[in-house]
Amino acid sequence: MLCTGLWDETTLKKDASCNKICLVMAANYQKEKPVSHTYDYESTDSEESDEEGLTLLQRAEHVRKSQGMFETEVWFGEEADSATLMKECKKNPGHYNFRHVSDFRQHHLPREYKERKLHRAIKTCADLTVKLSVFFTSRDRPEKYPGSDRLYPFYQSRGNFQYRRGGTGWVWKVEEYGEGKKEKSGPCECQECKGSDNPHKVWWEIIIMTAAHVVFDESECIKTYVTFWDEMKSKHCPVKLKGHGMGDSSIAADRGMFMCVTHDADFCRKLRTLCKRRAELTGYCDDKFCTNDVRGLSVVISHPHMDKKRITLGYGIARVDEELASYYSYDADTCFGSSGGFVWAVGWGSHHGSVAPHSYGYEKNSDYLFSTSHNKSGWSWPLN
């Protein structure tokens, strides 16, 4: 069941670079309860040090390591310095296997998978993959991950909005509501409309899938910004929306949904068309490349280090089938910022579906305390 949340006022701003209307969200954050720390976390100077002599980059690295195997990116300041984060990365120096969406070609597919429709499917999936910037850490995060002695990600930072966390998500579904609809017949109840004498009679909800450890609950959802079409040489103008309400979420499945609200019908119709195309193309490819061998092609689409969207390819390692879903292990490269990214087990998925959010990844550098030898998804979810 979807919950109702607060949503900041939206302003429309003309983007001269592409002569289109883009949505830009006003940065008026809801007031939070006070926290015990008093550092100035708004600075982006990586050389500024705290009382212990740690720079902002070092402090971010400390927080980053505290999450264990999960791959949420961490930074201080309003915007992530993705260039520095990419350069400082120890897991995948150079990021040679991370291809920008615009550079991804059919010849990059493995020999046995060089199929035009598969290439189109991956590009369409990429169109629906989004960047998430989270500006608050819930006070209700549990101390430990279920069935484990490991601390749950960012438990020690509960109530903290002094640093930012970043990950990836993807559009699952787009729904139109309001006048003439059986459900949620209106008027719109977003923050903009609640404060208006003339609220919109029709609105759209965009449902985003991600990992539960990226956006945990309502308090984090309403402090999350979603950036659509943030990629190199994109044919679309980037759009930024803010989280509006939390949907289904599961710690055990490491899978969560939340929604954004907008009144831009043209934008949402484009997303809905892409969702339909994605379901058709992934369904076709899953049938064509259907195999009982879990060592099939794996695709991961994410925003490593909050940089532009990238695609990585690999092969499957294992599939575990639960009563209601499956999850996958794979060797496609991932990095901090990949948490919640779009994972597709091409042809080797189960009847529960072949796509899932990325959950955690192994570390290649022995200096890190990662204990597994593969990447793992959250539970799968059907696209249609």
Image: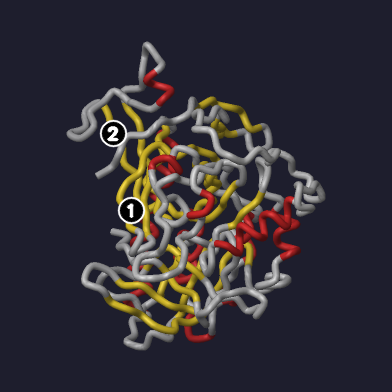
Q: Residue extending furthest right?
A: 47
Point out the image quarter for the C terminus: bottom left
- Coloration mode: secondary structure
Residue carrying label 2? 177
Q: Residue 249 carries which label?
A: 1
The kind of residue tagged 1 is Ser
Q: What element carries label 1?
A: strand
Q: Residue at x 54, y 62 (%)?
A: 67
**Mark 2, mark 1: which one is toward the viewer?**
1
- Residue 202 percent location from the top left of the image: 32, 27
Categorize mark 1 by other alpha carbons within 10 Å: few (<14), some (14-19), many (20+): many
Judging depth in this view, the residue of 263 and 252 nearest the camera is 252
- Residue 363 percent location from the top left of the image: 59, 75
Asked which quadrant contains residue 139, the reply is top left
Q: Which residue is drawn at 36% across and 22% down?
A: 200
Residue 304 appears anywhere in the view = yes
Judging depth in this view, the residue of 292 and 192 nearest the camera is 192
Judging depth in this view, the residue of 260 and 148 nearest the camera is 148
Point out the image quarter for the N terminus: top left
Q: Image height check: is 376 above or below 214?
A: below
Residue 101 appears anywhere in the view = no
Asked which quadrant contains residue 146, the reply is bottom left
The kind of residue tagged 2 is Tyr
